[in-house]
Amino acid sequence: MRIDLHLHSTASDGTLTPEALVDAAASLGLVAIALTDHDSVGGVAAATRAGIERGVTVVPGVELSADVPGGDCHILGYLVDVGHAPFAAWLAARREARITRGVEIVRRVNAALRSRSGAGAPQASWESVARRADLAGGGSVGRPHVADELVAVGAVTSREEAFASLLGNGMAGDVPSAKVPPAQVIAVIRDAGGVAVLAHPTYLPDFAGRLPDLVACGLGGLECLYGDYAPDVVAGLVALAGVHDLVVTGGSDFHGPSTGAGSGAIGVPLVPDSVLEALARRHGRG
Ligand code: AMP
Ligand code: FE
Ligand code: FE
Ligand code: ZN
């Protein structure tokens, strides 16, 4: 039986609602999914309700960004207590920081567009970005919402092109997030009763060298099955997880059809349900 433990919904930068994700997962025959929105657990309740109707187990999850010198580090929190008040407050503060950053991203991207094409250049509107991110409803704004706005105003033709020309690392719209060290991110997840898992490890420069420190901070798992990782990459990660006694997890990082993130398809790569059993055992260990 198959599962997918890394999915984004409209509660952050995915294009499908939590209910639509559950529907799609059920249609594909998945028995469990985790919702892992950036800095938000706002979609978990709706997904859980839909999951009960469709016979899909919904694992409460979240994806948090940590700052490490010279690279970005994404940490997934699984089986978190979404009702834990300090956790909810911490996430709300992170979403506030995303708003400040989002305003600056729009400002910088608009300046880049003007310097490229002059006064008549297409311009993104922050108000429109805020609507796309559903900030009024507690959404979590990120670069993909700016990308969608850039598509809408005709500056680019897709999210992927937006990242390739304006939003990618080192480009005009790559505004750093407020710095939170991995130790704090892991502590926040554990305080909320969750298991902390390093997402898409290969995106973190020198992840193998950094792993002992993360494990010392309480990291509990490694996302070994991800996107288009080749078999030898997966094998290397699984071996590393074994060395550090980390639970092996996996998921698609699906953000919606043709969004350019993750594998691009729910349920890809194939993740067996034994992964969730191992995660639950780790959760029980505390
Ligand atoms: P942010 O959270 O604002 O830093 O934006 C990061 C998000 O942008 C990731 O979670 C992905 O959803 C998305 N993303 C990053 N790189 C790309 C890319 N090359 N194409 C499409 N989406 C991307
Ligand atoms: Fe994302
Ligand atoms: Fe990520
Ligand atoms: Zn993700």
Image (cartoon, helix red, strand yellow):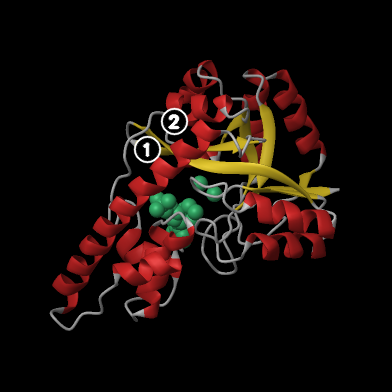
- Quadrant location of residue 127? bottom left
Q: Earlier in the sequence, mark 2 or mark 1?
A: 1
Identify the residue under disc 1. 71
Q: The C terminus lies in which quarter of the figure?
A: top right
Pick out the residue farthest to the bottom: 120
User: x%, y% of residue 71?
Assistant: 37, 37
Assign a secondary structure to mark 2: loop
Q: Is residue 132 above or below residue 75?
A: below
Q: Is residue 4 left or right of residue 138?
A: right
Q: Nearer the viewer, residue 231 or 59?
A: 59
User: x%, y% of residue 17?
Assistant: 62, 64
User: x%, y% of residue 258?
Assistant: 56, 69
Assign a secondary structure to mark 1: strand
Q: Nearer the viewer, residue 247 or 146?
A: 146
Identify the residue under disc 2. 206
| Label 2 to label 1: alpha-carbon separation | 9 Å
Q: Is residue 231 visible?
A: no
Tag 1: amino acid: Gly
Residue at (71, 26) in percent of width and height: 283
Q: Are marks 2 and 1 in contact (CB under 8 Å)?
A: yes
Q: Is residue 94 above or below residue 259?
A: above
User: x%, y% of residue 93?
Assistant: 39, 41
Pick out the residue farthest to the top: 216
